[in-house]
Amino acid sequence: MTEQNFIPKPYGKHIESGVVAWESPSNIALIKYWGKKKDQIPENPSISFTLNSCKTITKVSFFKKNDVVNFEFDVFLDGKKKVDFKPKIQTFFERVEDYLPFLRNYKFKIETENTFPHSSGIASSASGMSALALCLMSIERDLLTPLEVTDEYFNQKASFLARLGSGSACRSIEGDIIVWGETKQIEGSSDLFGIKYPYKVHDNFKDYQDTILLVDKGEKQVSSTVGHNLMHNHPYAKNRFQQAHENFEKLKPILESGDLKAFIALVESEALTLHAMMMTSMPYFILMKPKTLEIINKIWKFRQDTGSNISFTLDAGANVHVLYPKNESFEVLEFIKNELVVYCQNGHYICDQIGMGAKKIN
Ligand code: PMV
């Protein structure tokens, strides 16, 4: 597959106006994507659990216009017009217009809402960009004949487009475990789009839980875009990218055998490596907060004291994703309520679990 595969044939159908809607989830990486080349091509492969409850719901209404001079669109979040969202979507439209040549022919009204609080510090870019990409794919599907767009192509191209909006968004189209980035460890893997993890997965990982502890709901001091760029000329970048490939080699037998202890070691090491890359960038930065570290230490102690299979991962922020098998939910949730909620801003946390991907809303 190359980019060329995503340039559509001339549209055979004429549509004056319409409405499409999708809900698309967030995802949490186990092996992290950190560092990219031009056009959102990742420096290393990554793998994630698709989430279930943290999602964006997006409705796109489109109306044919006469001129093709500019992109025309308005964005609404929770019913309120969001002018500050426009530059990001303008950039996205510019990046994808070769692949979606209808974009200049219509005026769009993009209405979006998140199931998680906007100011929770949870990135909405993965769910937001994937939901928008899926809506645009639904419009394209209507403009082509049904046979021209197979479900496989639809998902691949939606993932390809979402990637151009925000890298990790390409892992939010399907579930339950998604790989993005070419690696010889995973057959069919691609830098251009996410694929479903193609090998056997042990039942231990089937209903894996992710409780997100909201340590800091504020705006991040350093954006992901800046962080990715700091991996250029980073003293440890080469080894880090190599390590991600090696971690895929390790993860395959873990996912197959259900070895939770090995899973925990790999996932926690990935999370801390991500943050170690931030701390060793130039300029350096720290996104963890003191409470993030308090939580990590409590999790380690609880695990040591009880033999629990609780673990944590982090994304590019201070919040902690607490991961655990479903059959340990009762004990872990008691532990969270008794010992970890005190570290959450206003006591807030979100219970989520591994999910099956985006859904079309009719
Ligand atoms: O998709 P971006 O550009 O927001 O980068 C996301 C990077 C991490 O969340 C830190 C890791 C990942 O693989 O999701």
Image (cartoon, grey):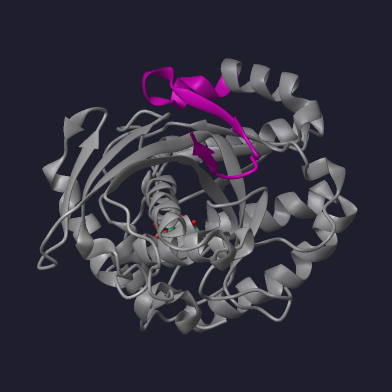
In the rendered view, would you say 350 is above or below 201?
A: above
The part of the image, by quadrant, that contains residue 45 is bottom right
| Residue 196 located left or right of residue 44 | right
Q: Does residue 359 belong to the magenta stretch?
A: yes
| Residue 139 located left or right of residue 324 | left
Instruction: Please tell me in which quarter of the rendered image ligand 1 is found.
Output: bottom left
Residue in the picture at 27% in, 56% down: 222
Q: Residue 272 at what x, y percent from top left? A: 54, 56
The part of the image, by quadrant, that contains residue 124 is top left
Q: Kindly tell me whether residue 236 is visible in this rendering.
A: no
State the quadrant of the N terminus: bottom right
In the rendered view, would you say 166 is above or below 113?
A: below
Q: Kindly tell me whether residue 130 is visible in this rendering.
A: yes
Question: Residue most toward the right?
Answer: 257
Relative depth, front residue between 255 and 182: 182
Residue in the picture at 53% in, 51% down: 172
Please count the marks in the image: 0
Residue in the picture at 67% in, 53% down: 177
In the rendered view, would you say 331 is above or below 244?
A: above
Q: Does residue 310 belong to the magenta stretch?
A: no
| Residue 267 located left or right of residue 125 | right
The part of the image, by quadrant, that contains residue 291 is top left
Relative depth, front residue between 147 and 39: 147
Q: Residue 123 at what x, y percent from top left? A: 38, 45
| Residue 316 located left or right of residue 94 | right
Q: Residue 58 at what x, y percent from top left? A: 37, 39
In the rendered view, would you say 158 is above or below 339?
A: below
Q: Residue 309 at what x, y percent from top left? A: 77, 38
Question: What stretch of residues is rendered in magenta?
Answer: 339-362
